[in-house]
Amino acid sequence: MSDEVLVARLLNDNVLIPCLIAGGIIFVVGIKSFASVLRTFARERTRREIAAFIAEGSMSPEQGERLMKAGSKDC
């Protein structure tokens, strides 16, 4: 099927708008999922760094606990 025939069929069968809406929804969900993964990786990296500071003795466990709780939603 050529490009012209495909475009004509999309326009004539009234499926272009639903396809664009579905594509937009899939795009937004994909971007939000990717952002969530990045946020999780950053949080875990921060937790590892705080644990390393506690292990080397430059931070007390209480300070580390306060830092870990600082950004959480259940403060």
Image: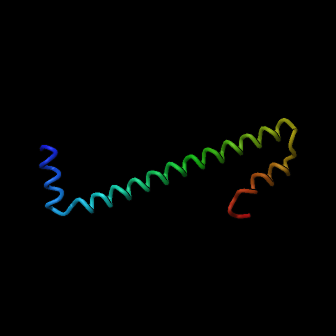
Whole-percent x, y for residue 25 in the image: 38, 59
Whole-percent x, y for residue 73 in the image: 68, 62
Q: Answer left or right for 30 relative to 60.
A: left
Please tell me whether residue 30 is drawn above or below residue 75 in the rendered image.
Answer: above
Please tell me whether residue 34 is drawn above or below residue 20 in the rendered image.
Answer: above
Whole-percent x, y for residue 8 in the image: 14, 54
- Say which residue appears at 14% left-offset and 55% top-offset: 9
Please tell me whether residue 73 is drawn above or below residue 56 in the rendered image.
Answer: below
- Say which residue appears at 75% left-offset and 52% top-offset: 68
* Count of labels in the image: 0
- Say which residue appears at 70% left-offset and 64% top-offset: 74
Q: Answer left or right for 50 relative to 35.
A: right
Instruction: Between residue 53 and residue 29, name the one nearer to us.
Output: 29
Q: Quadrant of residue 69?
A: bottom right
Seen as rendered, the residue at the extreme top is: 56
Please tell me whether residue 69 is drawn above or below residue 38 in the rendered image.
Answer: below
- Say which residue appears at 47% left-offset and 51% top-offset: 31
Say which quadrant the N terminus sits in: top left
Say which quadrant the C terminus sits in: bottom right
Q: Answer left or right for 38 relative to 18.
A: right
Whole-percent x, y for residue 44 in the image: 66, 45
Render colour scheme: rainbow
Q: Quadrant of residue 70?
A: bottom right
